[in-house]
Image: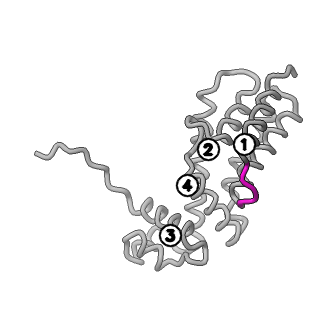
Amino acid sequence: MDTRATTPPTDARTRILDAVERIIVNKGVGGLTLEAAAREAGVSKGGLLYHFASKEALLTGLLQRLSDFVAAEYAAGVARQPEGPGRFARVQIAWAFGESDCYPGEDRHDRAAAVFLAAFHHDPALLDPMRAVMARMKADLLADDIPHGVAMTILTATDGLFMAHLFGLYPPTETDLAALRATLDGLLERPA
């Protein structure tokens, strides 16, 4: 009897979405065709069409999976924070600064960035599931029992870090990141 641990087989839908993500990361949305997705996933075109009837359906599935992942990671980060003012702000700051208990990892972060750009390029409405997650995060921040301006500063600063990475606008130095982190943490330490 073979007692080696084995990885359970990945379902076809997951393999297809993983393949689509790889194609987008490596070739952009222009490289995404139904044929390329089927080939990369190791399924027939008919098998792909069973799960996803079009390129839009592939992108919609990919964005929904990403949105579900972000929502779950955010909820897990919130659950790890103590109750009280600033709880949601601390989660967003931790995530933005790559802390291991909240951050999806550099590779996942880079793949998410590629998916965001591809979806936006193809059809901005595809980002609606992610917009809903982000709207929830903003609402949590605004209800976090911290001043409105502090909440918006944290939201804008953490989103700015993501956008700088997403578009390669500028590489923040360690000094930049340390100063920004100290400032954001300091905002949470001030009484309301």
Answer yes or no: do the residues labelled 2 and 1 have beta carbons within 8 Å? yes
Question: Which one is closest to the eye, mark 3 or mark 4?
Answer: 4
User: Label 3 vs label 4: CA separation?
Assistant: 14 Å
Label disc, if present, on residue 115 of the rendered structure: none
User: In 3D space, how far apart are the residues under numbered discs 2 and 1 (Cα atoms)?
Assistant: 9 Å
**Label 1 element class:** helix
Image point 57% across, 50% down: which residue?
106
Q: Nearer the viewer, residue 180 or 28?
A: 180
Q: Which residue is at a point 45% across and 65% down the rendered structure image?
A: 16
Helix, strand or loop at disc 4? helix
| Labels 1 and 3: the sequence-earlier one | 3
The prevailing secondary structure element of the residues shown in magenta is loop
Identify the residue position indicated by label 2 in the image: 71
- Percent across and percent down for residue 68 are 58, 49
SS at badge 3: loop
Q: Which residue is mark 1?
A: 136
Is 55 left or right of 131, judged from the image as shown?
left
Q: Is residue 11 magenta?
A: no
- Which numbered tag is attached to residue 65? 4
- Mark closer to the observer (3, 2): 2
Q: What's the magenta region?
A: 168-172
The residue sitting at 20% across, 45% down in the picture is 4
Q: Position of residue 167 (x, y in %)?
A: 72, 61
Label located before the other in sequence (2 or 1): 2
